[in-house]
Amino acid sequence: MPTGKKIALITGANKGIGLETARELGKAGWTVLLGARNSDLGRAAESKLRAEKADAHFVPLDVTEPQTISAAAAKIKAQFGWLDALVNNAGIVDQQDGRASVASVAAIERVMRTNFFGVVTVTQAMLPLLRKSKAARIINVSSGLGSIARNANPPWDLQWSLLGYCSSKAAMSMFTVQLALELKQDRIAVNAVNPGYTATDINQNRGHQTVQEGSAEIVRLSLLEDGPTGGFFETAGPIPW
């Protein structure tokens, strides 16, 4: 079993919540692997965190391209040997997504490809590395918009009824609970996190939270060696599926 510095892979880590999560884990002494599909942006993020004294490394990874995921897993195995945490943060919205009666099916497929199928593919590829940790954790960055309970009695108006996006996060919830049950005997915790309405590019920076606030629960669960599994959390505590 590994005994050195903790290692985390964060997808979509070149900006926003992903970059801030990497920054905070770096401050905590972790090695942070910055998964990003754009090499220029990934290397810029790496340079930024290294200037802040973080042990940061850019890893080319597009969650919609299986060959880049396989290559990333091979690179991490060869260079680092294992993972202690996987943060599935990469996600998109689509302009043609919308209410259930009018949402573009092509847009729904694009969103699902990144937000759900990408999470499944990355996680499955990284599981052999996570199994080498003494106490690994997987954090799936979800959204309150993926809560079926909240959608049934929404605290927001219909502008947030995005069939593709909400469905992708609800599907992530099913993946989270099924994987948590399967991996319990392997001491791998699996949880979903709602960061809250955070100012990032995905909402044209209209969110009322800072990226520090949005990443707080992700970081907390990443740092817990004996934390919960199979849950859906935000900074205020557990939330309904």
Image (cartoon, rainbow, N blue to C red):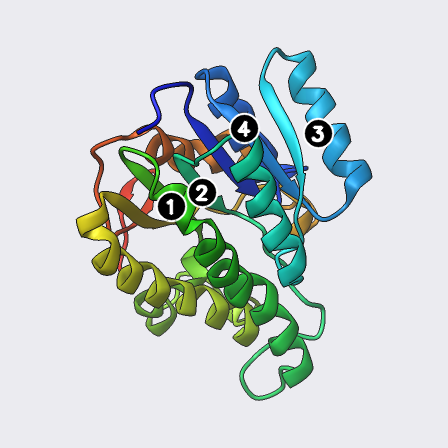
Separation of residues labelled 1 and 4 (CA atoms): 14 Å
What percent of the width, then of the height, locates residue 188?
Answer: 28, 45
Amino acid residing under circle 1 = Ile
| Mark positioned earlier in the residue sequence (2 or 4) | 4
Check the image and name the residue furthest to the right. Answer: 40
User: Earlier along the polypeptide chain: callout 1 or callout 4?
Assistant: 4
Q: For mark 4, what is the residue?
A: 32
| Circles 3, 1 touching at the beta carbon (< 8 Å) | no
- Residue that extends furthest to the bottom in the rendered view of this protein: 101
The first of marks 3 and 1 along the sequence is 3
Using the image, determine if residue 94 lies above or below residue 219.
below
Q: Earlier in the sequence, mark 2 or mark 1?
A: 2
What residue is shown with label 2? 86
Q: Secondary structure at mark 4?
A: strand
Tell which circle, 3 or 4, labels the residue nearer the N-terminal end. Answer: 4
Q: Give residue 220's quadrant in the image.
A: top left
Distance of mark 2 from mark 4, alpha carbons? 10 Å
Residue 138 is tagged as: 1
The amino acid marked with disc number 2 is Leu
Q: Evaluate if marks 3 and 2 touch, with contact meaning CB atoms under 8 Å apart.
A: no
Question: Residue 137: x, y in percent?
Answer: 34, 41
Q: Residue 204, percent across and down?
A: 70, 49
Where residue 160 appears, as percent x and y from the top left, is: 54, 66
For disc 3, the neighbor class at 10 Å (few under 14, some 14 to 19, many from 20) is: many
Which residue was labeled with disc 3? 45
Residue at 59 percent across and 55 percent down: it is 91
Comparing labels 3 and 2, the label whose residue is closer to the camera: 2
